Image: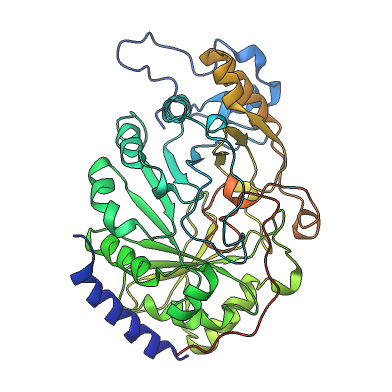
Amino acid sequence: MAAQPVSRMLRRVLRSSVRSCSSGAPVTQPHPGEPSQPAVEPLSSQVPSGRRRFLREHAAPFSAFLTDSLGRHHSYLRISLTEKCNLRCQYCMPEDGVPLTPKADLLTTEEVLTLARLFVKEGVDKIRLTGGEPLVRPDVVDIVAQLHQLEGLRTIGITTNGISLARLLPQLQKAGLSAINISLDTLVPAKFEFIVRRKGFRKVMEGIHKAIELGYSPVKVNCVVMRGLNEDELPDFVALTEGLPLDVRFIEYMPFDGNKWNFRKMVSYKEMLDTLRQQWPELEKLPEEESSTAKAFKIPGFRGRVSFITSMSEHFCGTCNRLRITADGNLKVCLFGNSEVSLRDHLRAGASEEELLSVIGAAVGRKKRQHAGMFSISQMKNRPMILIDSDSGGLGCISNSPQMVLVPPVPAPPFE
């Protein structure tokens, strides 16, 4: 399918949706009413000497508990709000779904907010809400509103499959939502329905339109690229950026338990870039932002841009500033690490703030220089994506069970 016809088709979808859619604060700064506290005390004795030395040698103070042994400051927290999803992607789960973690074992709203307050107090200035599908959580708007009240939190983002976005986004924006990532792995409506076993392509496009209408710029569209399924649509996605303020993010397919990952299915960043430069040789690289996971490019004259998330072929571990809390309250310091610590259990055992910080600091302190590399992590035991973070796009991100199965490539249905 040529890029221009797809672009025109999507513009028609967006126009028609107008009618159908519903319209880190430094720890040295005390909160009001609290006494001034030193950045590292009173638990500095629990911080490894290497991290204490790093903090002394740098002018800008940052929480010792969120600084690892290599001096990386972790100011970005991703929180999974739910394991549930309103799609049934055939590469992720059986049509009837999979067993979910009992509700009693998931973080309550107050527990989510308690942990968020603690991390923001220690220097986190960006929180992204993920899932599963975070918009299926009934109190998601209230959670955003309460996060918006946290002094020092500069960005509240969300990663969604877009099904409910057009309906909820006006409320979310009013509550304080400042950034949106929408997962979309195909631009062909029939293929979308074939993949997810549900209708919904138009709803996703309405969500993208609503985000643009409400002034979000750029609107990030996450597309996990997988050989045999959607790599032929790369030019069609790029064509969307000509007239729309989108940041289309092509993500290398990554291994997690049960998704039957293999090297043949992964399309590398360099291969994707070579493909696009055949059509747009003027594609130019933009300066990389600090701690960014994306390599950004732009076609001169286009309104949006294109990015590549190179988790597999070219890791960005050296500048990683991200931590993750799973829906059941486990802290993961590395997406590809299989080491987790339960903050939920410590909360429910009555741990004090200092005790929680000690647990968090110990976990961050154990963070490795980089992940094991794609040859090794494909063999590692690691949670499926839904329990970690759905910010890597659609493929492989919405299952919560080792039963998750990615079916082998099959002949495509006849698309019109």
78 displayed left or right of 54: left
When asked about the image quadrant of residue 100, the answer is top right
Q: Quadrant of the C terminus?
A: bottom left
Rendered view: 232 above or below 373? below
**x, y percentage for residue 139?**
35, 38
**x, y percentage for residue 224?**
56, 67
Rendered view: 82 above or below 63? below
Q: Residue at x 33, y 28 (%)?
A: 151
Is any atom of residue 383 visible in this view?
yes
Q: Residue at x 55, y 48 (%)?
A: 389
Image coloring type: rainbow
Is any atom of residue 188 visible in this view?
no
Q: Residue at x 63, y 38 (%)?
A: 333
For the residue pair 23 and 298, the one nearer the viewer reads as 23
91 displayed left or right of 114: right
For the residue pair 30 and 17, the one nearer the viewer reads as 17
For the residue pair 210 and 288, the one nearer the viewer reads as 210
187 displayed left or right of 214: right
Rendered view: 348 above or below 271? above
Q: How many marks?
A: 0
The residue positioned farthest toward the front in the image shown: 96
**x, y percentage for residue 399?**
60, 54
Rendered view: 408 above or below 406? below
When asked about the image quadrant of residue 162, the answer is bottom left
**x, y percentage for residue 301?**
33, 79
